Amino acid sequence: MEHVLKYATYKVEIGGFAKYDSAKADEFERFTLGPAIDRAAKAGLLTPDDIDKLRYFKDNYRNPYNHYNLKKITSNYYIDGVRVVNTNTGDVEVRDIAAEDDPIIQAQAKPRADADNVLECFVFADSVVKAVWLRLTQGADKPE
């Protein structure tokens, strides 16, 4: 998704598929997703709704995974019925533990979060790629 935003914007800015500009290509390679969204919007490849959805995706899915922020990835998960032993008294308490409150629970909850989110992320990314590619190729020569 990030690549297609950069590639499509690059092609708009250089004026088509048959042209190549090495310096501009290098410039696009240095972009992260945020600037790629902004540049694609400026190039007319994104609607205001697309921009909002892409920024939400960047902040809530892409960045936490790229920067391996387990606390954010698992913030809506908890493990219920955890037996917690007080090592001083030997007392056992059963309680629910939010993943955001415990790194060990975060590691256990992450595979569940991954499974819950993978299809939504794929469908979103696929829809962005298709929409941007369609906008890029409408009225333009087909890619070589």
Image (cartoon, helix red, strand yellow):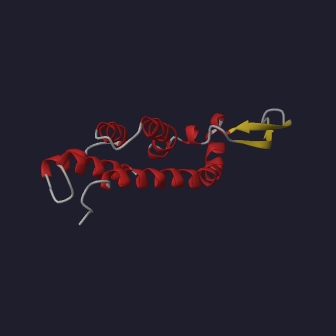
The C terminus appears in which quarter of the rendering?
A: bottom left
Classify residue 138 by image quadrant. bottom left
Comparing 131 with 121, the one in front is: 131
The answer to whether residue 25 is above or below residue 84 is below
Q: Residue furthest front?
A: 139
At 27% from the left edge and 62% from the top edge, which residue is drawn?
Answer: 142
> x, y (%) of residue 60?
52, 39
- Tell how many labels: 0
Q: In this view, does 78 lie to the left or right of 85?
A: left
At 17% from the left edge and 47% from the top edge, which residue is drawn?
Answer: 24
Comparing 46 with 21, the one in front is: 46
> x, y (%) of residue 118?
57, 54
Classify residue 50 by image quadrant. top left
Classify residue 80 by image quadrant. top right
Q: In this view, does 9 lie to the left or right of 68?
A: left
Q: Is residue 130 left or right of residue 61?
A: left
At 17% from the left edge and 60% from the top edge, which residue is drawn?
Answer: 18
Comparing 37 with 43, the one in front is: 43
> x, y (%) of residue 86?
79, 35
Q: Which residue lies furthest to the bottom in this view?
A: 144
> x, y (%) of residue 32?
33, 42
Q: In this view, does 95 lie to the left or right of 26?
A: right
The answer to whether residue 52 is above or below residue 131 is above
The answer to whether residue 75 is above or below residue 21 is above
At 28% from the left edge and 41% from the top edge, which residue is drawn?
Answer: 43
